[in-house]
Image (cartoon, rainbow, N blue to C red):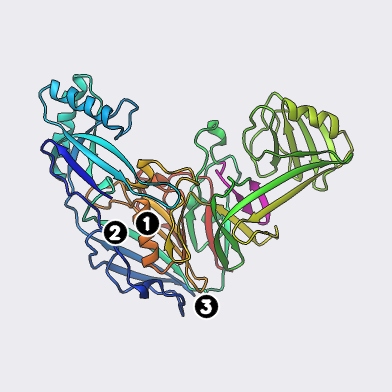
């Protein structure tokens, strides 16, 4: 990963060191999960300070700090699309605009590193000036001149770049020893699928020992529906959100956990033998889609279609105009357009419509048994597979420069060779306090902790870890954000 100054006077270090970890840190077998004794794997590999708290049998919490603050601020001139970087011609045009108002810009080449499913990509940035951490206000004053001249700029903290930094890092790690842990794992969507809720609230309601924010939720739907997970969600053996095909997920059952990729198939089978694919579960319906709503949805079905209300056995107990709540003990098949016509033809009053649900582990090619102890939390990006850094950013929809290279707060889950579970949060977006991590750093960090498999969950302002009903990390929003779902560690 590198950034090179092509023109101008902005002096910034040119590369981030990718550390090769000692073989002992990723040994094929582990007797138990232990915090590593090696130096912190990021930056100049400083010696971290750590404080360990025994939470309960088999669960330890580590408060880890490493590195020091040496980064400052610069002004980043935004490209025509509003992004930080872009093609060389766009960047050169911005250089000319900056020079036209009497300022000296720096044109920088930025290489977004390759990941497992996407090649490296080169883009260019235009930046002006350099201010130490304590002089952010001076940078903000300088930015006003550019905005008055019609140039869009932002005050940019260099520690967020994803390139060379000395930190600091503020990290929380929960290690759950498979040999001695006697509790269980679960997922929670809170009081409903549609509603967002804090991890603290979900953990308290379940009497959880540990709570961690889960996967991404849909911010591009109606405000009242934004708790909907983007990807597979299973709670107590009930599929409450369909998978994004091939996306990484954490599968929890009893006190076991694994990371894999999932595919879900849901089919409505009418009493007359006709079949129709169910396109989604507990989410807004697009034109011609057939969507299943369960009692956990917590919102009204969409208006403008047909609702078929079924009891627990699949018997149709009502056909109605859509736009009403889902009563307890029922499920609703909703369709509009072509899907609505199928319901009108094949889901009559007192008929039976079977809903056939399959959740398949794409690594083993085996179907998961939807038993009451099965839970699934969808992740955003696979990080480590079989002990090797394997970042599946493109497959998981996060292969942008911003997501791969820049640093953000991270929520991470890892599994060791003996099945022990590692939960971690790396706080970020707090200049001078903690810089967060990019995908490569997050993967290196989880390998350092001993993870043979690791996944990135939702991060940014969503990153939250609750231990013993206390929020132990420091969210970048300044307060805990309501999220879609949570991964919970239960006492039994």
Residue assigned mark 1? 442
3 vs 2, front mark: 2
Real-space Cα separation, disc 3 to disc 1, in angstroms? 26 Å
- Closer to the camera, 108 or 433? 108
* Highlighted range, magenta: 228-241
Indicate yes or no whether the magenta region holds residue 230.
yes
- What number is the disc on residue 18? 2
Residue assigned mark 3? 179
Q: Is residue 334 above or below residue 27?
A: above
2 vs 1, front mark: 2
Q: Is residue 319 above or below residue 264?
A: above
- What number is the disc on residue 418? none
- Closer to the camera, 282 or 103? 103
Helix, strand or loop at disc 3? Answer: loop
Looking at marks 3 and 2 on the same chain, the residue that comes earlier in the sequence is marked by 2
Residue 313 in picture, x, y percent from top left = 83, 48
Residue 211 in picture, x, y percent from top left = 49, 58
């Amino acid at each position: 990963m590198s950034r090179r100054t092509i023109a101008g006077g902005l002096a910034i270090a040119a590369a981030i060191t990718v550390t090769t970890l000692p073989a002992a840190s990723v040994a094929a077998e582990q007797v138990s999960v232990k915090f590593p004794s090696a130096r912190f794997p990021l930056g100049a590999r400083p010696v971290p300070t750590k404080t360990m708290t025994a939470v309960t049998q088999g669960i330890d919490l580590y408060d880890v700090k490493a590195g020091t603050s040496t980064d400052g601020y610069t002004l980043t001139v935004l490209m025509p699309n509003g992004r930080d970087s872009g093609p060389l011609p766009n960047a050169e045009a911005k250089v000319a605009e900056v020079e036209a108002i009497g300022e000296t810009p720096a044109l920088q080449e930025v290489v977004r590193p390759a990941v497992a499913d996407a090649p490296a990509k080169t883009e260019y940035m235009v930046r002006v000036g350099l201010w130490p951490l304590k002089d952010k206000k001076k940078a903000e004053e300088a930015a006003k001149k550019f905005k008055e001249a019609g140039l869009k700029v932002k005050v940019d903290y260099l520690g967020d770049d994803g390139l060379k930094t000395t930190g600091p890092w503020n990290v929380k790690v929960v290690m759950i020893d498979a040999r001695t842990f006697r509790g269980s794992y679960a997922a929670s969507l809170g009081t409903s699928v549609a509603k967002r809720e804090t991890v603290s609230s979900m953990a308290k309601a379940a009497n959880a020992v540990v709570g961690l924010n889960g996967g991404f939720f849909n911010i591009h739907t109606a405000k009242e529906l934004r708790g909907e997970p983007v990807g597979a969600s299973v709670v107590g053996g009930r599929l409450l959100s369909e998978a994004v095909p091939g996306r990484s997920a954490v599968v929890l059952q009893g006190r076991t956990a694994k990371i894999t990729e999932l595919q879900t198939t849901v089919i409505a089978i009418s009493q007359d033998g006709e079949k129709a694919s169910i396109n989604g579960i507990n989410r807004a319906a697009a034109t011609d889609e057939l969507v299943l709503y369960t009692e956990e949805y917590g919102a009204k079905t969409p208006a403008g279609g047909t609702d078929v209300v079924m009891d627990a056995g699949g018997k149709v107990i009502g056909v109605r105009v859509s736009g009403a709540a889902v009563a307890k003990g029922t499920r609703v098949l909703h369709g509009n357009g072509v899907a609505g016509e199928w319901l009108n033809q094949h889901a009559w009053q007192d008929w039976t419509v079977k809903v056939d649900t399959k959740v398949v582990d794409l690594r083993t090619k085996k179907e998961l048994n939807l038993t009451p102890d099965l839970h699934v939390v969808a992740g955003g990006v696979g990080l480590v597979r079989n002990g090797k850094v394997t970042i599946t950013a493109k497959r998981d929809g996060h292969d942008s420069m911003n997501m791969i290279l820049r640093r953000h707060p991270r929520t991470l889950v890892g599994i060791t060779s003996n099945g022990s579970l590692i939960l971690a949060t790396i706080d970020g977006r707090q200049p001078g306090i903690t810089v967060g991590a990019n995908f490569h750093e997050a993967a290196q960090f989880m390998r350092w902790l001993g993870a043979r498999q690791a996944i990135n969950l939702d991060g940014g302002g969503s990153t939250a870890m609750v231990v013993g009903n206390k929020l132990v990390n420091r969210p970048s929003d300044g307060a805990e954000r309501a999220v879609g779902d949570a991964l919970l560690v239960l006492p039994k």
